[in-house]
Image (tube, grey):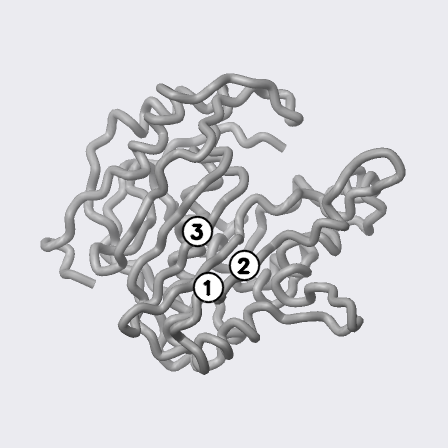
Amino acid sequence: MKTIDQRTPDSQYQRLLRDILEKGERSNSQQGVDTISLIAPAPIRFKLENGFPIINERNMAPKESDRLPVTVWQQAIGEICAFANGVRTQKGLEEFGCHWWSSWVTEEKCKKRGLETGDLGPGSYGAAFHDFPTAEGKPYNQFQNIIEQIKEFPHLKTHFITPWIPQYIIRGTGKQQKVVVCPCHGWIHFRVLDNKLTLHMFQRSGDVPVGVPSNMVQYAALLMMVAQVTNTIPYEFIHSFSDAHIFVDQIPAVETMLAREARPFATMKIDTSVKNFFDFRKDHFTLEDYNPHPGIKGIPVAI
């Protein structure tokens, strides 16, 4: 990464928020709060030499508390590490340092899907990434195989991972969804050019004020992890969307973020001693040079 004084302030996140407000369409949602949605906005692109894409428009690293001694950005990295290792329960996620799934895995919500309380379901991220069902009956570990393929055939354009197991997600008469939340992100295309690794992540549905900043953190961290174990250079993270939206009760917080000046991105360091991808944890990352605007308390989250 460039030194902090050489980095260019990045306003792409603000541009995305502004585009949704100015060009999006208002519609109702299953959560009961209207959204303003923009279909297929321009992607946001982050070359890691210009810093790590953790937003400065609000603080993603609030002070630790006795109740939850882990920051938002650490939870985001803990979540992607857990999913890559096949975790699909609230207990398992908490062991990786991610605590924000409790509202979606209640007894009521899980029972509706025929699941045990605390289970995200066989159609969830961890199941898809680590234990994808196959015709042969043996679960398929997507990350393990893609990492092996990158090492052996780095030039291929087929380094692709999906979070979508359709038979567990479809709804309708005679069908039962077997996941508490249909995967919103995680369609991942890795590309190696001149030994530089790019990660392009497509997101089907993005809550841009609340969820997307965490997605930016976890997939940029994922790029660093995969680059380290494949001996490539972590070059660029590209984030594309289908339905990028703002819930209408989030608009005051969005307006606050839009009024703030853009600042250079922070530095993220990774523990270079980790050689096995599945050994990575949130504690292998260290955030430095982070200078965000103050946090915004109470941004509504649709459940």
Q: Position of residue 75 (x, y in %)?
A: 49, 54
- For image coordinates 49% across by 19% down, the residue present is 248
Q: Secondary structure at mark 3?
A: loop
The quadrant where residue 219 appears? bottom left
Res. 129 in view: yes
- For image coordinates 46% across by 24% down, the residue present is 250
* Mark toward the start of the polypeptide (1 vs 2): 2
In this rendering, the answer to whether 174 lies above or below 187 is above
Q: Secondary structure at mark 1?
A: helix
* Mark toward the start of the polypeptide (2 vs 3): 3
Which of these two is toward me, 61 or 274?
Answer: 274
Q: Residues within 10 Å of mark 2 (few under 14, many from 20)?
A: many
Q: Residues within 10 Å of mark 1 (few under 14, many from 20)?
A: many
Q: Which residue is mark 2?
A: 97
Circle number at residue 142:
none
For the C terminus, the image quarter is: top right
In this rendering, the answer to whether 180 lies above or below 228 is above
Q: Secondary structure at mark 2?
A: loop
Q: What type is the residue that disc 3 sits on?
A: Thr
Q: Which residue is mark 1?
A: 282
- For image coordinates 33% across by 22% down, the residue present is 255
Q: Which residue is mark 3?
A: 71
Q: What type is the residue that disc 2 sits on?
A: Gly
The reply to whether discs 1 and 2 touch (Cβ–Cβ < 8 Å) is yes
Q: What type is the residue that disc 1 sits on?
A: Lys
In this rendering, the answer to whether 248 lies above or below 220 is above
